[in-house]
Image (spheres, helix red, strand yellow):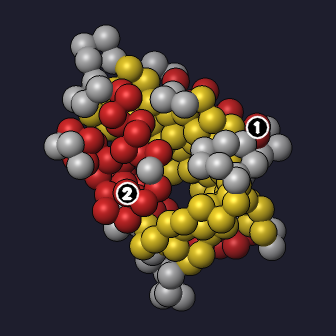
Amino acid sequence: MSNQEGPFKNRQADGESDRLVMHVLNRMGLDSPSWKSLIVLNFADAEADSKLVWLTWADIDNWPSMSPLVNSTRWTSGEPWRPGSEFVAELNLGLRLGGKTAKNRVVSVDPGRSAEWGRSRRGLRTAHLVRFEPRQSGGVRITSVAVFHGSSIGVLKPFVAKRWQRLFQAQVEGLVDMADTGG
Protein backbone atom coordinates (compact mmCIF):
# COMPACT_ATOMS: atom_id res chain seq x y z
CA MET A 1 0.00 0.00 0.00
CA SER A 2 2.95 2.32 -0.33
CA ASN A 3 1.30 4.38 -3.06
CA GLN A 4 -1.45 5.56 -0.72
CA GLU A 5 -1.22 8.82 1.14
CA GLY A 6 -3.67 10.92 3.07
CA PRO A 7 -6.59 8.99 4.58
CA PHE A 8 -4.90 5.60 4.35
CA LYS A 9 -2.34 6.75 6.91
CA ASN A 10 -5.07 5.89 9.42
CA ARG A 11 -4.18 2.21 9.65
CA GLN A 12 -3.75 -0.27 12.44
CA ALA A 13 -0.22 -1.34 13.28
CA ASP A 14 -0.94 -5.08 13.06
CA GLY A 15 -1.47 -5.11 9.28
CA GLU A 16 -5.17 -5.92 9.63
CA SER A 17 -6.08 -2.63 7.93
CA ASP A 18 -4.03 -3.59 4.88
CA ARG A 19 -5.76 -6.99 4.71
CA LEU A 20 -9.23 -5.44 4.95
CA VAL A 21 -8.48 -2.81 2.30
CA MET A 22 -7.06 -5.45 -0.03
CA HIS A 23 -10.15 -7.59 0.54
CA VAL A 24 -12.40 -4.71 -0.53
CA LEU A 25 -10.20 -3.85 -3.53
CA ASN A 26 -10.13 -7.49 -4.63
CA ARG A 27 -13.90 -7.75 -4.31
CA MET A 28 -14.08 -4.79 -6.71
CA GLY A 29 -11.81 -6.65 -9.14
CA LEU A 30 -8.78 -4.46 -8.36
CA ASP A 31 -5.32 -5.78 -7.51
CA SER A 32 -4.20 -2.49 -5.97
CA PRO A 33 -5.32 1.12 -5.64
CA SER A 34 -4.52 3.58 -8.41
CA TRP A 35 -4.83 7.31 -9.01
CA LYS A 36 -8.57 6.62 -9.53
CA SER A 37 -8.98 5.11 -6.04
CA LEU A 38 -9.92 6.81 -2.80
CA ILE A 39 -9.67 4.66 0.31
CA VAL A 40 -11.37 5.86 3.48
CA LEU A 41 -10.41 3.80 6.52
CA ASN A 42 -11.81 4.45 9.99
CA PHE A 43 -11.99 2.63 13.28
CA ALA A 44 -13.13 3.20 16.84
CA ASP A 45 -13.58 1.16 20.00
CA ALA A 46 -16.95 0.83 21.73
CA GLU A 47 -17.35 -0.26 25.33
CA ALA A 48 -20.80 -1.70 24.62
CA ASP A 49 -21.34 -5.40 24.00
CA SER A 50 -20.62 -6.39 20.39
CA LYS A 51 -24.19 -7.65 19.91
CA LEU A 52 -25.62 -4.26 20.93
CA VAL A 53 -23.18 -2.42 18.66
CA TRP A 54 -24.15 -4.67 15.73
CA LEU A 55 -27.89 -4.25 16.36
CA THR A 56 -27.52 -0.48 16.66
CA TRP A 57 -25.56 -0.32 13.40
CA ALA A 58 -27.68 -2.86 11.48
CA ASP A 59 -30.81 -0.71 11.95
CA ILE A 60 -30.17 1.68 9.06
CA ASP A 61 -32.87 3.99 10.41
CA ASN A 62 -30.23 4.89 13.05
CA TRP A 63 -27.65 6.01 10.50
CA PRO A 64 -28.84 9.63 10.13
CA SER A 65 -28.74 10.05 13.93
CA MET A 66 -25.16 8.82 14.18
CA SER A 67 -23.66 10.61 11.22
CA PRO A 68 -23.54 13.97 9.46
CA LEU A 69 -22.79 11.91 6.34
CA VAL A 70 -26.24 10.30 6.08
CA ASN A 71 -29.47 12.28 5.63
CA SER A 72 -31.81 9.29 5.24
CA THR A 73 -31.88 5.57 4.50
CA ARG A 74 -34.45 3.00 3.46
CA TRP A 75 -34.53 -0.60 2.30
CA THR A 76 -35.82 -0.90 -1.28
CA SER A 77 -35.76 -4.66 -1.86
CA GLY A 78 -35.13 -7.91 -0.03
CA GLU A 79 -34.74 -8.69 3.63
CA PRO A 80 -32.46 -6.32 5.57
CA TRP A 81 -28.83 -7.39 5.58
CA ARG A 82 -29.24 -10.37 3.28
CA PRO A 83 -26.99 -10.74 0.20
CA GLY A 84 -28.75 -9.21 -2.79
CA SER A 85 -30.90 -6.87 -0.69
CA GLU A 86 -30.84 -3.22 -1.69
CA PHE A 87 -31.05 0.05 0.18
CA VAL A 88 -30.88 3.73 -0.65
CA ALA A 89 -28.90 6.25 1.35
CA GLU A 90 -29.23 9.99 0.86
CA LEU A 91 -25.73 11.28 1.57
CA ASN A 92 -24.18 14.62 2.37
CA LEU A 93 -20.69 14.25 0.93
CA GLY A 94 -19.98 17.96 1.10
CA LEU A 95 -20.02 18.49 -2.63
CA ARG A 96 -21.63 21.70 -3.76
CA LEU A 97 -23.87 19.58 -5.94
CA GLY A 98 -26.26 18.97 -3.04
CA GLY A 99 -27.15 15.59 -1.59
CA LYS A 100 -26.22 12.35 -3.29
CA THR A 101 -28.48 9.33 -3.60
CA ALA A 102 -26.55 6.07 -3.32
CA LYS A 103 -28.39 2.89 -4.30
CA ASN A 104 -26.51 -0.01 -2.73
CA ARG A 105 -26.62 -3.78 -2.93
CA VAL A 106 -25.61 -5.98 0.00
CA VAL A 107 -22.80 -8.31 -1.04
CA SER A 108 -22.13 -10.35 2.08
CA VAL A 109 -23.11 -10.43 5.73
CA ASP A 110 -21.77 -12.28 8.73
CA PRO A 111 -24.34 -11.16 11.35
CA GLY A 112 -22.71 -9.58 14.35
CA ARG A 113 -19.29 -9.60 12.63
CA SER A 114 -19.32 -7.82 9.26
CA ALA A 115 -21.28 -6.53 6.29
CA GLU A 116 -20.29 -5.50 2.78
CA TRP A 117 -22.20 -3.54 0.19
CA GLY A 118 -21.53 -1.46 -2.87
CA ARG A 119 -22.57 -0.23 -6.26
CA SER A 120 -21.34 0.45 -9.75
CA ARG A 121 -22.78 3.23 -11.84
CA ARG A 122 -21.52 5.36 -14.73
CA GLY A 123 -17.89 4.40 -14.31
CA LEU A 124 -17.88 4.88 -10.55
CA ARG A 125 -17.56 1.85 -8.29
CA THR A 126 -17.94 1.93 -4.54
CA ALA A 127 -17.51 -0.80 -1.97
CA HIS A 128 -17.92 -0.69 1.79
CA LEU A 129 -16.99 -3.08 4.56
CA VAL A 130 -17.85 -2.65 8.21
CA ARG A 131 -16.37 -5.12 10.65
CA PHE A 132 -17.09 -5.66 14.34
CA GLU A 133 -14.32 -7.42 16.23
CA PRO A 134 -14.85 -8.25 19.93
CA ARG A 135 -11.92 -7.10 22.08
CA GLN A 136 -10.39 -9.30 24.79
CA SER A 137 -10.88 -6.49 27.29
CA GLY A 138 -14.57 -6.20 26.40
CA GLY A 139 -16.42 -4.10 23.92
CA VAL A 140 -15.77 -4.13 20.21
CA ARG A 141 -13.42 -2.63 17.61
CA ILE A 142 -15.38 -1.18 14.67
CA THR A 143 -13.50 -0.91 11.40
CA SER A 144 -14.97 0.79 8.34
CA VAL A 145 -13.41 0.59 4.89
CA ALA A 146 -14.88 2.52 1.96
CA VAL A 147 -13.30 2.40 -1.48
CA PHE A 148 -14.37 4.71 -4.27
CA HIS A 149 -12.93 4.02 -7.71
CA GLY A 150 -13.29 5.77 -11.05
CA SER A 151 -11.87 8.62 -13.11
CA SER A 152 -14.20 11.13 -11.46
CA ILE A 153 -12.87 10.10 -8.04
CA GLY A 154 -9.30 10.52 -9.27
CA VAL A 155 -10.12 14.09 -10.26
CA LEU A 156 -12.09 14.91 -7.08
CA LYS A 157 -9.80 13.13 -4.60
CA PRO A 158 -7.60 16.16 -3.78
CA PHE A 159 -10.71 18.15 -2.91
CA VAL A 160 -12.75 15.57 -0.99
CA ALA A 161 -10.38 13.06 0.64
CA LYS A 162 -9.85 14.82 3.97
CA ARG A 163 -13.51 15.80 4.32
CA TRP A 164 -14.74 12.29 3.54
CA GLN A 165 -12.23 10.87 6.04
CA ARG A 166 -13.68 13.16 8.73
CA LEU A 167 -17.30 12.36 7.77
CA PHE A 168 -16.76 8.60 7.87
CA GLN A 169 -14.84 8.89 11.16
CA ALA A 170 -17.74 10.88 12.60
CA GLN A 171 -20.07 8.09 11.51
CA VAL A 172 -18.02 5.41 13.32
CA GLU A 173 -17.72 7.59 16.43
CA GLY A 174 -21.46 8.34 16.27
CA LEU A 175 -22.14 4.60 16.32
CA VAL A 176 -19.89 4.24 19.37
CA ASP A 177 -21.70 7.08 21.14
CA MET A 178 -25.13 5.67 20.29
CA ALA A 179 -24.25 2.12 21.37
CA ASP A 180 -22.35 3.11 24.49
CA THR A 181 -25.22 5.32 25.72
CA GLY A 182 -27.93 2.83 24.76
CA GLY A 183 -29.31 4.77 21.83
What residue is shown with label 2? 62
State whether residue 34 appears in this view: yes
- Determine the residue located farthest toward the front in the rendered image: 79
Residue 163 vs 21, above or below: the answer is: below
- Three-letter amino acid code at disc 2? Asn
Can you give x and y, in whole percent of width and height, for residue 168 in the image? 42, 55
Residue 40 vs 96, above or below: the answer is: above
- Observer-nearest of 40 and 90: 90
- Determine the residue located farthest toward the left in the rendered image: 181
- Three-letter amino acid code at disc 1? Asn
Categorize mark 2 by other alpha carbons within 10 Å: few (<14), some (14-19), many (20+): some
What residue is shown with label 1? 26
Tell me the number on the disc at residue 87: none
| Residue 9 found in image quarter | top left
Q: Secondary structure at mark 1?
A: helix
Can you give x and y, in whole percent of width and height, for residue 73 in the image? 50, 66
- Spatial distance from mark 1 to mark 2, Cα to Cα? 30 Å
